[in-house]
Image (cartoon, rainbow, N blue to C red):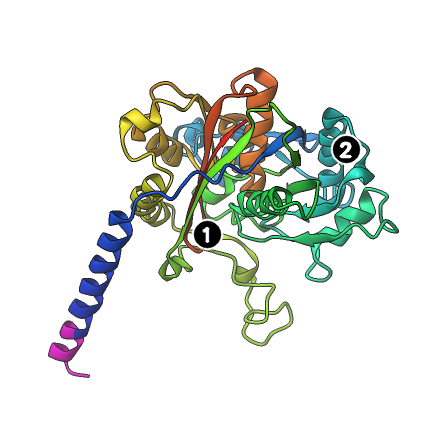
Amino acid sequence: MDTESKDTARARVDQEHGAQRRRVLAHGPGPDLDWRVRIAGLGRYLPQRRVASAEIEQRVGLPAGWALQNSGVAFRHWAQPEHERASWMGAQAARMACEQAGIAVGDVDLIVNASGSAERAIPDGGPLLQRELGLGRSGIPALSVHATCLSFVAALELAAERIHHGRIERALIVSSEIASVGLDFDSPEVCTLFGDGAAAAVLERAPDGSPSRIHRIAWRTMGEGVEITTLRGGGSWRPPLGPLTTPADAVFSMQGQAALRSGIRLVPYVMRQLGLDDRAARDGLRWVAAHQASRAALDVIAQIGFEHARMVNTLEHTGNCIAASIPLALEQGVREGTIRRGEPGVLLGTGAGLSGVGLTMTY
């Protein structure tokens, strides 16, 4: 293809993308889903080892205070995988969530492992979590939903829809992440950002008279950004013993600025689909629980303008815990009173791929 033809093709693609974006933005939000579902209990587990940013800065030769200033993280927790396996961590959070909900762990109809990192390639984390909970003979359906940092929201939608339509009464969603095993210590923005942790939620049908609801869900994926945040190894493309596999394939890589720019481009669609594209609509929200992607990402969310909403921030003391970040923010918000029963709020985030998501709900 000659240069002129390439330019013509590129212009046509750009024109098509622009037309698609205009169609998407012209389409307003759908009706309120009004799913009568509530979060009945929340739980968390943070590994015993608490790692100060100063320790990492000294290890990789960064100036003191660099991590807090650039990544927004002062402390994070790193697991000891021989003792704190992902399924074990998830089970601790799940038991706490069930206790708060006033149920036994076996009183659920569905177990969803909603994690961006895997304990094993096979089986998926659902059966591992089920066994760790002592339910290995229960027969309770257990499966995994993997949408990187947005896995919890994806699992929440899946389980809530089943509850709303009467297929199940109660579900347990668990996000348990060990990011520390795949950090690139030659990349300051990666090694200072991520932490390990687990969080769980019990979902159930909201009782009569309860204000709890799930209202709207918006999801948008732009697959052209798959290389912006990636871990190449472990799959069929770069298997552990593959002839083309290199040590670099075993660590997570991230183009921070590119991820931020791509995430910002997803914001107009998500906000419009949620019916939150004007300030008056956002004024009705009372809380925001966002994926703790980075300091810059949280600043972008704050700049959208949620004047009457309380923002939950866990980043400084836990780091970016991949899919566990959003449920950790929910758990902290409820525990500290930032998120209160009967108040409307929103879950927001971006994930590798690149995807953006928003979910409005009345807690």
Q: Position of residue 62 (x, y in %)?
A: 44, 35
Image-quadrant location for residue 242: bottom right
Residue at left offset 36%, top offset 61%? 224
User: Dot 1 surroundings within 10 Å: few (below 14), some, or many (20 or more)?
Assistant: many
Amino acid type, residue under disc 2 in the picture: Arg
Which mark's residue is nearer the viewer, 2 or 1?
A: 2
- Dot 1 falls on a residue whose secondary structure is loop
Between 96 and 159, the one nearer to me in the picture: 159
Identify the element where label 2 is drawn.
Answer: helix
For residue 102, which numbered disc appears in the image? none
Tell me: residue 141, above or below residue 53. below
**Residue type indicated by callout 1:** Ala
User: Whole-percent x and y of residue 42?
Assistant: 66, 29
Res 235 → quadrant: bottom right
180 relative to 300 in the view: left or right: right
Q: Is residue 109 magenta?
A: no
Image: magenta residue range: 1-8
Residue name at image x 66 percent, y 41 percent: 173
Q: Please, which residue is most extreme toward the top here? A: 337
Q: If the image is split into quadrants, where does the N terminus sit?
A: bottom left
**Residue at image point 24% right, 48% down:** 26
Q: Which mark is residue 95?
A: 2
**Furthest-right residue in view?**
137
Residue located beneath label 1 in the image: 352
